[in-house]
Image: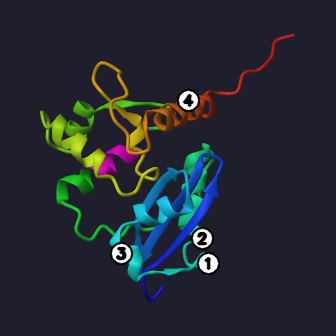
Amino acid sequence: MARFAYDIFWTALGWAAVLGSPNGLRRSVLPVATPREALDALGAEAQRADRDADAMAHARSAVLAALHGTSPPPEPPFDLEGVSPFFRVAWQACRSIPMGETRSYAWLAEAAGRPGAARAAGQAMARNRMAPLVPCHRVVASDGRLGGYGGGLALKERLLAMEAATAMPARVALK
């Protein structure tokens, strides 16, 4: 890809979008109600991008798999230009949370090398531009409350429930 490219696509949860550069995926958008909302959520960089479904096919597949709880293909490389070192580490720590499980903001802060910086970890999740590939929906308050979510709490609940069901080991019926 020689320039910025994006794609907008339908999921069972709404319209999602991805934006990439020659260096990798720069942003993914959680499902919203309309294609226009998805395009707007990509931000100003989308204004200088071309819609190119072929160039964004791998990123689109990864996002769809993450939203539907299926085995994702290998994730595309991320273009993290402009992302602070702490956010990078926090996002990587978030990616280590197994599907179907949750961790607290305090855990995330410690895993990112800054114990006691739960609020900073919360900011890293609030500014996560790679959701659901950086699965910030798996991060909850220390008391188990869901807290906030860019896609709304109903989507966070739905993703967690879907992952919990998908991650459960198969049960064998006894005769």
Task: Give the mark nearest the N terminus, 3 or 2.
Answer: 3
The magenta stretch spans residue 91 = yes
Task: Give the mark nearest the N terminus, 2 or 4.
Answer: 2
Left or right position of 71 against 100: right
Q: Which residue is mark 3?
A: 45
Q: Which residue is mark 2?
A: 57
Left or right position of 171 against 162: right
**In the figure, 9 relative to 120: above or below?**
below
Q: Which residue is mark 1?
A: 54
Res 161 label: 4
**Prevalent SS, magenta region:** helix
Res 26 label: none
Residues rendered magenta in the picture:
90-97
Q: Give the image location of residue 135, x and y in percent.
A: 42, 45
User: Label 1 amino acid?
Assistant: Asp
User: Label 4 amino acid?
Assistant: Ala
Q: Quadrant of residue 21?
A: bottom left
Left or right position of 173 against 97: right
The magenta stretch spans residue 173 = no
The reply to whether discs 3 and 1 touch (Cβ–Cβ < 8 Å) is: no
Mark 3 vs mark 2: give the one in front.
3
The reply to whether discs 1 and 2 touch (Cβ–Cβ < 8 Å) is: yes
At mark 4, the secondary structure is helix
